[in-house]
Amino acid sequence: MRELTQVVDRISVFILDMDGVLYLGKTPIKGAAETIRWLRKRGKRIVFTTNSSAETRRAQARKLARMGIAARESEIITSGFVAALYLRKRSPRAKVYIVGEKGLRLEFERAGLKLVPYERAEEATHVVVGIDRKVNNKKLTGALRALLGGAKFIATNADATYPTEDGLLPGAGTMIGALEGCSGKKPSVVFGKPSPRMIKIALGILHSKPSKAAIVGDRLDTDIIAGKLAGVTTILVLSGVSTRQDIVKFRRMKIIPDFVIDGIKDLVHR
Ligand SMILES: [Mg+2]
């Protein structure tokens, strides 16, 4: 693929999805750390993105470090971070009820936003929902009361599933579906890909034009669609969720990645 080598040379910003591109669960994908080092040596700027809101940016940086990938917190964009940025800008006095994990709560606290507990859920102005692997009836009850009381429904991401070493597990779409089912409401904003929001924020932080950037992702239905909407070069890796059969299926819907590679290590050339 001579053309890919030319594009890799021309692109200055690489926006990388993490799950399915750099690792599966806790297992690093072969060649990921070497590829990041190679890109950095060539002066490429890198942004790490994830639809997951389970961990803070700091925790994500530590996770990458354990896999031999050096990343600064400022190079990481999560859907939870973007949701907190959005609310801080639009509604700095928001009272937020969260259905999500510790990382999401921390990201909102760090942004200086006020969180309301279950006992005062009715006071919430916003319900923010992300993946919660300890979701229970009480947490959902709080969110239902807040939504029925008029709070805005916001979702970090709507991924139906996420990939692990043991196969697919239920994603944030599970919690959103549960709340849609009981409240009859749908989220008014979803920050994760396929929304191009995270990519646009990455381009803004690096003052880069879309024409100089590429997204590398493992999902046609999120990463590649988001990349197309943001106008960046799209590179699909087959080391995560999407398969060759999916490529055929999505081609019928005119969703065609610019490049398809087996894994991130295929970006490297001499
Ligand atoms: Mg992924």
Image (cartoon, helix red, strand yellow):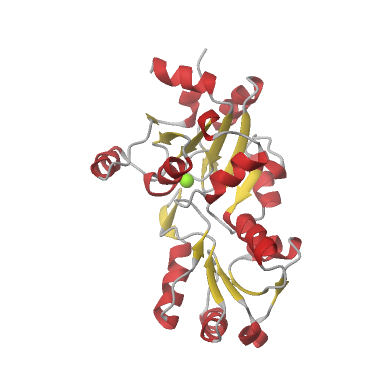
Toward which corner of the image does residue 180 lie, by quadrant? bottom left
Q: Residue at x 64, y 56 (%)?
A: 81
Q: Position of residue 179 (x, y in %)?
A: 46, 76
Residue at (60% x, 22% y) in the render: 38
Farthest residue, direction top = 270
Q: Residue at x 46, y 41 (%)?
A: 227
- Could you say which is closer to the camera, residue 65 or residue 41? 41
* Residue situated in front as seen by the camera: 88 or 105: 88
Give coordinates of residue 117: x percent, y percent: 67, 80
The N terminus lies in quadrant: top left
Q: Decide which of 35, 16 is in the foreground and name it.
A: 16
Give above or below for 102 relative to 180: above
User: Could you say where residue 8 lies in the image, as x and y percent from the top left?
Assistant: 51, 22
**Residue 35 in view, yes or no:** yes
Determine the residue positioned at 52% across, 53% down.
51
Q: Is residue 182 above or below residue 207?
A: below
Residue 103 showing in the rendered view: no
How many marks do you count on the picture?
0
Left or right of 121 in this view: 232? left
Between residue 96 and residue 21, name the one nearer to us: 96
Could you tell me residue 181's position as x and y percent? 39, 78
Does residue 249 appear left or right of residue 260 in this picture? left
